[in-house]
Amino acid sequence: MALIKSISGIRGTIGGGAGEGLGGVDVVKFTAAYAEFIRRHNSGASRIVVGRDARISGEMVNHLVTGALMSMGFDVVNIGLATTPTTELAVTGLGADGGIIITASHNPVQWNALKLLNSRGEFLSDAEGKEVIAIAEAEDFRFAEVFGLGREYRDDTWAMRHIEMVKSLPLVDCEAIAEAGFTVAVDAVNSVGGVVIPKLLRELGVKDVIELNCEPTGKFAHTPEPIPENLTQISGMMKEGVADVGFVVDPDVDRLAIVMENGEMFVEEYTLVAVADYVLSKTPGSTVSNLSSSRALRDVTVGHGCEYSAAAVGEVNVVTKMKETGAVIGGEGNGGVIYPELHYGRDALVGVALFLTLLAKSGKKVSELKAGYPRYAIAKNKIQLTPDIDVDAILEAVKEKFSNETITDIDGVKIDFPDSWVHLRKSNTEPIIRIYSEAETMEKADRLAAEIKDVIASL
Ligand code: MG
């Protein structure tokens, strides 16, 4: 059993006693605190959008969230099964005062969570998240009197509206995609992507769609995080040469991994790199990713004569930096593409449409495209912490030891070497230090991580 309250929302496993997991009491309290927060910042606020991914507990949590919002006097526009980016677009499209997405993203089926949005359809900032937690902990909210209760409205048009918005983007070329006559395989891990991605592909002009795990039953066919070790099913199928490209999304469809025509991984780090390469070729401008993302984005950006900036880890930090620098494209190396032309949220639908346009116009195979990008490999390691370890002191000491290199300390410590980097960060959710290292090959990246581990051990 687990229940984690953090600035990015409330997250937990289903079942157990009060306070042990994501139970009814905590969902209602947290939702009421969010409603109170929205009203404090906008006294006329009256409408919240609610969407959910297809996980099994979604319907139950949806009832709790909807009831809590109504009891706080808010009308609820329930858009039903919806991706995270679709819910974000519905908030602004409906002129609502906020939104809640019921999803535990890439976490396994036992988990669920609430992601909280402001009236711009963007995630709450750190400070705003803290305010919601404080209100929840103090139970500092008031429920509405009987004549002030909210109502629930249903609106299931948003998946299609989202697809239309993606199709209308000037850089998405449906004609080029149709002309290419693509066969595309999709693995949507039996969540909401199973409904929306095949529909998007057909609307974009894809000739044949091979659907894998596209029933939105919430019974995840494999561990849902779209990383190589979980994608053996689609990769095995594609080794037979059945499709030009494969797309895999996580349960709430804000992360996109690509599988090459030969069944090998394009690698999730390169989703953003490829899409950015295409966007920059048409509309030059700056780019942003987080500190733990591949240097390939920087190289590609510089190759287009543009400027790259790094942000702290976390979508809200990347979005803040993108606004600051006026970035034309940005995101995260985990397959999260943020294209402000549509909205400031990671959006796998946008990623699919831009990537297919790039692929069609290039006339290349996916593996040929990949070969044209700077070659890097990222090793993702961790160190288990014990209570007596002072993480901040360790990070300080590492900084000191490598003071001759380029150091970035906006989020943990990142050391940039001429042809590699290593990023150490304390996890917010587990007692570990994450060590991400990138170099020309996986062997070198692993060696770099091992060296840093040795340094830490010697401290
Ligand atoms: Mg996600």
Image: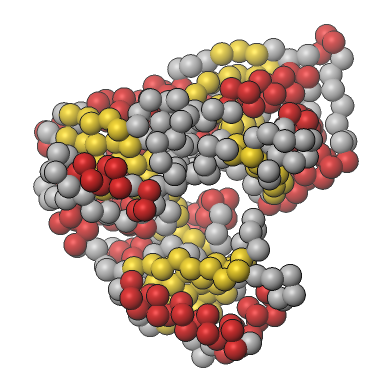
Where 181 falls versus 151 (above or below)? below
Q: Is residue 42 left or right of residue 366?
A: right
Closest to the observer, 24 or 121: 24
Point 52% across, 30% down: residue = 55
Find residue 57 and report its horizontal and vertical position in percent: 59, 28
Is residue 224 in view from this perspective?
A: yes
Q: Is residue 113 left or right of residue 108?
A: right
Is residue 48 in view from this perspective?
A: no
Q: Which image quarter is the C terminus in?
A: bottom right
Point 54% across, 51% down: residue = 315
- Quarter where residue 247 is shown: top left
Q: Is residue 339 left or right of residue 47?
A: left
Find residue 445 and report its horizontal and vertical position in percent: 38, 75
Q: Which image quarter is the N terminus in?
A: top right
Closest to the observer, 40 or 262: 262
Closest to the observer, 246 or 417: 246
